[in-house]
Image: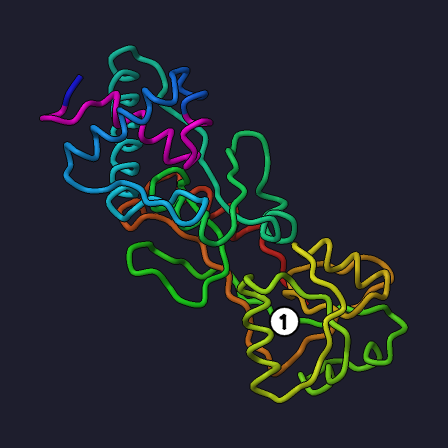
Amino acid sequence: MELGHLSTDALASFAVFADHLNFTRAAEDLHISQPALHVKVRKLAETLGRPLYLRQGRRLVLTPEGEAVARFARDLDARVTTFLSGIRGTSPARAPVLAAGEGAYLYLLGDVVRPGIRLINAGRAGTLAAVRTGRADLGVAVLDVLPADIRAVHLASYPQTLVMPDDHPLAARPSLVLADLAGSPLVVPPPSGPHRIALERALRAAGIPWSLAVEAQGWPLLLHFASLRVGLAVVNGCVTAPPGLVQREITDLPAVPYYALHLPGRADDPLVTDLLARIRASLPTGL
């Protein structure tokens, strides 16, 4: 079937490609050859007169036009499914799709994750892309700059805390300031991560000397190294410290805001509103 000059088959194939951003895996899902998928995507781009993806190093990323096409393709598929269900007298209901990162799933959304919800595990950029392309109905992420094209609903803000063994000298204090970290070995994320960048910027601005104990990816590994006394770790206040560790708020670091993200036109969509209500009802209170 064609819409004007747009092939619905090509649109559906592009939506699968947008999920993976990998021609090999997308072609496997579609049960077609990789060259055949390349042809579909290339002809779709030629029809629209716009590039739909770009290569950044070894990665493929969607252009804004590519995001719009993927979003349109998924919306079209949903409309066709609803139409056919109405004709056949069956229910068009589908499971809501939630996108978030590892930390949000572990410490913020645990009570929301249950059968009947499809999950996408992605970092901040991947969560934003999943919402923009319509792959996810709702995303949850920490944002320092709110996007203009996505509705961002504030969920909660949590203080930044220092995690340390419960017999550490700083554990006796009810709260801390950045200056208390002077000279401490710290367990921190890799340099490219937003948490690491913000923490280093704050320490540098305050003139606080510190040393690198080890770099670790993800809150669980940071906590693990802190429990092994490799160094101290700065984590968001929604993170739960395991036995043997304590966490104290660092009062002169800004709170970390978590947002729920969805497309502007879906503010009244039950798939979005019901999932958002579940998340709000389950949020931890923090310290």
* Farthest-out residue, top: 88
Residue drawn at point x = 68 percent, y = 66 percent: 188
* Farthest-out residue, right: 167
- Amino acid bearing label 1: Gln
**Based on the displayed image, in which of its 4 quarters is residue 198 positioned?**
bottom right
The stretch in magenta equals 3-26
The crowding category of the residue bearing disc 1, from other C-alpha atoms within 10 Å (few below 14, some 14 to 19, many at least 20), is many
Quadrant of image for the C terminus: bottom right
Q: Main secondary structure of the magenta part?
A: helix
**Based on the displayed image, in which of its 4 quarters is residue 201 positioned?**
bottom right
Residue drawn at point x = 60 percent, y = 88 percent: 206
- The residue lying toward the viewer, choosing from 44 and 245, is 44
Q: Is residue 135 left or right of residue 49?
A: right
- The residue lying toward the viewer, choosing from 274 and 28, is 28
Return the x and y of residue 240 as percentages of the image width and height.
Answer: 72, 58
Q: Residue 108 lies in magenta, yes or no?
A: no
* Farthest-out residue, left: 4
Colour logic: rainbow
Residue drawn at point x = 44 percent, y = 42 percent: 274
Secondary structure of the residue carrying tag 1 is strand
Q: Is residue 50 left or right of residue 213?
A: left
Return the x and y of residue 265 as percentages of the image width and height.
Answer: 26, 47
Residue that badge 1 annotates: 160
Return the x and y of residue 108 as percentages of the image width and height.
Answer: 60, 53
